[in-house]
Amino acid sequence: MRTLLRPTLAAAVVALAASLVAAPVATGAPPAAAAVDDAPGTTVTWTVQPATADGPDGRLSLRHVIDPGASVTDHVTVSNLGDGPATFAVYAGDGIVSDAGYFDLPPAGPPQDGGAWVALDPPAGAETLDDGRLRLTLEAGAAVTVPLTITVPADATPGDHPAGVVAELVAGDTVRLAARTGVRLHLRVAGEVTAALVPEQVTARWEPSWNPFAPGTVHVRYVVRNAGDVRLGARAATTLAGPAGLAAAAHTAELREVLPGQSATVEATLPVWPLGRASGHVDVRPWVVGEDVVDAAMRTASADVAVWTVPWSQLGLLLVLAAGVVLTRWLRRRSARGVQERIDAALAAAGVPREPSDATGARAPVR
């Protein structure tokens, strides 16, 4: 039987991305809620919010700085805002940033980093599954607060270890359509950190314009890798110019955040005049994201880029112009020969002797 994804499922997926993203500036907006049509006339809507033992406390995310070997407790509240009872799987996972730039959890596999350090305490009525997830069934309008403990291994490396806690809608014994929403966990292990973003895998491709009086396009693609251990945002700038710095062009891009050990791909397009070769560099300048505190030097990193910009359309125009000149001269000579032949024919018909010519066809001078 085919399963049709209703528009509200798309809303749930969007809600997941929105609820897991930590905005650079706190807006005070209410938490995003996921919503899915579960049965005709029934909509399941739910939220996950940071909380104390007494319930939601208005925070946008969970944020902790913990020493290696130490632990801390916190809470999240799962609320069923729908029309009927619903079952959710609640679990923690490692954090990633998607290709679209939004914070998310990997779709499969057990957590290996910060998410693995989060243990959920089952509240009354919850079931603990074999994989560590909690299974909660909530009546319409009900909410439950889930205690959690974050325990950092003694050998954990200093820096950011992003994670999140999500509630995923369940139907029967299986996860239904992977519709989920959650809370982000900003988890930092205390200690000396390094902040470094590095541009790598730089490639450039030249695309000439068909119009010889317009510049072509250089497509530059590169990867910005976080070689440090704290999350960072960045301003990435690509500059190119012809020989002696002629016809310079630039492109800038902003990366909201790049997590430690992860990377982001940037694609830049620059209008460049075909002067034979264009060269320049990619510069990545890091900055601190949101409320983070980074006690480390942040330096701009650069990588060279160069590409041959062959002026194909301009060469084609020159070829056409040269061909036009040659053709014009040939036509003029041909026309002149035709005129001369008619003159000679008329003189011959009148009995006038034809003057001798030299090898080039010119009339020989009469001595």
Image: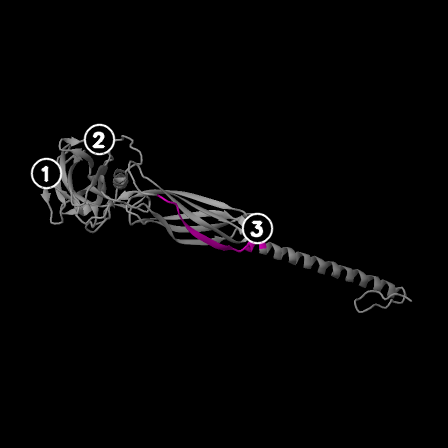
The residue at the far right in this view is: 367
Residue 212's label in the rendered image is: 3
Label 1 – label 3 distance at C-alpha? 71 Å
* Residue drawn at the location 85% of the way across and 62% of the way down: 346
From the viewer's side, name the closer residue of 273 and 238: 238
From the viewer's side, name the closer residue of 311 and 159: 159
* Residue drawn at the location 15% of the way across and 35% of the way down: 84
> In the structure shown, which secondary structural element does the residue marked by tag 2 occupy?
loop
Q: Position of residue 327 (x, y in %)?
A: 68, 59
> In the structure shown, which secondary structural element does the residue marked by tag 1 occupy?
loop
Which residue position holds label 2? 58
Label 3 – label 2 distance at C-alpha? 60 Å
| Numbered disc in front, either 1 or 3 | 1
Q: Is residue 194 visible?
A: yes
* Residue drawn at the location 11% of the way across and 49% of the way down: 130
Given the image, on which type of amino acid does mark 2 rest?
Answer: Gly
Q: Position of residue 172 (x, y in %)?
A: 13, 45
Residue range corresponding to the magenta coloring? 298-314
Q: Is residue 41 visible?
A: no
285 relative to 318 in the view: left or right: left
Label 2: few (<14), some (14–19) or many (≥20) C-alpha neighbours in 10 Å: some
| Numbered disc in front, either 1 or 2 | 2
> In the structure shown, which secondary structural element does the residue marked by tag 3 occupy?
loop
Q: Position of residue 340 (x, y in %)?
A: 81, 62
Q: Does the magenta stretch include residue 305?
A: yes
Which residue position holds label 1? 123
Label 1 – label 2 distance at C-alpha? 21 Å
What is the count of numbered marks? 3
Q: Earlier in the sequence, mark 1 or mark 3?
A: 1
Q: Does the magenta stretch include residue 285?
A: no
